[in-house]
Image (spheres, rainbow, N blue to C red):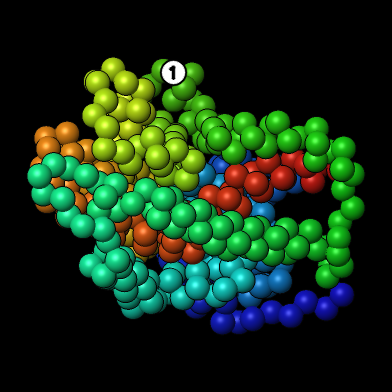
Amino acid sequence: MATRVDPTLLKEMKKYGAVGIEKCFNCGNCTAICPLTSDDYAFPRNMIRMVQIGNKEKMAQSIDPWLCYYCGDCSVTCPKGAEPGETMMAARRWLTAQYDWTGLAGKFYTSKVWEFGSMILLAILVVLAFVFFSGPMVTDSVELNTFAPIHVVHMADWIMAGFLLLFIGGNILKMYNAVMRSDGHFPIPIPLSIYISEAKQLIVHGLTQKEWDTCIEEDIENKEMTQERIARITHFLLVSGYGLMLVMIIFFLSWFQTDNIYPIYHPQRWLGYYATIVLLWGAGYALWGRTKKGIQAHRFSHASDWIFPVLLFAVALTGILLHIFRYMGLPLPTYYIYIIHMAFTAPMLILEVPFGKWAPVCPQRLLDKYSEILMEAF
C-alpha cells in the first residue's frame, strides 16, 4: 500500500513545541536508554523518524507518544541535542489536535491569539452573565445562594458536563478509529473478552499512572526523593485534587455551595481543604518548576504549559478566599470573589479540559493500557 508523506510536517511540529528535531540522525540512543521502550514499542526513535519523513498517516495511528512520561533520559543522553523528549511532548499535542473533531485544539496549540482571546472572551461573558442575571446582593448577611441560586448553577454545571462529554467522547471515538486502523483498513479485530479482562487494570492505570514509576524505579528502590520523584508524587496528588473538585462541582454542588456554616471537623470542609491544598501545591510546583527548569520536562515550555497551571492556581486561590470571606460574614467580598472564581473556572473547564493542556489526559490514560490489550490480542 502506498504511503503519502507530507514534507511540511516537521515545520508543523515546531508549532506544537518540537525542538531540535532536525538534528536527529537516527542513532537509536534514545530508544536504547528509554526505560519504557520494548520490542513492540521502540520509541521515541520511531516517532522522530515519522516526523522527519512526514508520515502523518502512521503518526495518527501511533500510540507511542502516549506511552512516554517524559523522564528526559533520552534528551540528556542525546549526542546531537535533538531533544527527543520534547518531540514526544509535541507529538502528543499534535495528536490531540488530530483527534479533536472541532478543530479548536489545533488553533489553541498553534495560535496564542486564539487561546488567550477565547479565554478572555469566555471570562468576560461569565462576568456579564452575573451583571445581568444574578440574584440580589444581600448585604446584611452572606446569602450566596440568593446571589447565585444553586439550582441555576447546578443546571449550568450539568449542561457544561454534557458538552464536555460530547467533545471528549467525540475525540476518543476519533482516536479509537485512528488507532484501530491497520494499513488503511478497519477495524483490527479484538475479542470483547480481552477488553473485559483488562477493564480493571485500565481503571487502576488511569487513576495512578503506574507506568510512570518505571521511569523513576531506581529512585524508588534507593528511597531517594529526587526532583523527578517529587514531580511524580505531586502530579498524582494534583490529579486526585482535580478529580475531587470535578466530582464536588458536578455531583455534590448543593453540599459545597451552601450558606450553612459547618464546624471545622465536618467532612465538607476537609474535602474542600484537601482539594485546595493539593491544587495550590501542584499548580504552584508546575509554575515554579517551569521557571527554574529543574527537571528535563520543564526545560522547554509551550504556552499551554503555563496557561493551565495559572488557571488552576487562580481557581483554587479564589475558591479558598470565597470560603474565608463567607465564614467571616463578609457579603460583598464573598459575592465579588465568587464572580472572579467563576470567571477563572469556566475557561479552565470549558476550554482547557477538552482542547488544551488537560486534553491529552484521556488518550494517555486509555492508550497507556490499550497497548497491552493490542499485544494480548495478537
In which quarter of the view is residue 244 placed?
A: top left
- Front in this rendered view, residue 138 or 1: 138
Residue 38 horizontal/vertical position (percent): 69, 42
The spot of residue 121 in percent (x, y) is 32, 74
Q: Is residue 224 left or right of residue 58?
A: left
Image-quadrant location for residue 231: top left
Between 59 and 188, the residue placed more toward the observer is 188
Q: Identity of the amino acid at label 1?
A: Asn
Name the spot of residue 343 as percent of width and height, x first.
28, 60
Quadrant location, the C terminus: top right
Q: Is residue 86 visible?
A: no
Classify 9 as above or below 263: below
The structure residue drawn at horizontal position 74% and vertical position 80%, both measured from the top left corner, is 4
Residue position marked by numbered label 1 in the rendering: 222
- The residue at the point 50 percent across, 69 percent down is 105
Q: Residues within 10 Å of mark 1 (few under 14, many from 20)?
A: few
Please name the residue shown 83% across and 70% down the image.
Answer: 184
Q: Quadrant of the N terminus?
A: bottom right
Q: Is residue 50 left or right of residue 73?
A: right
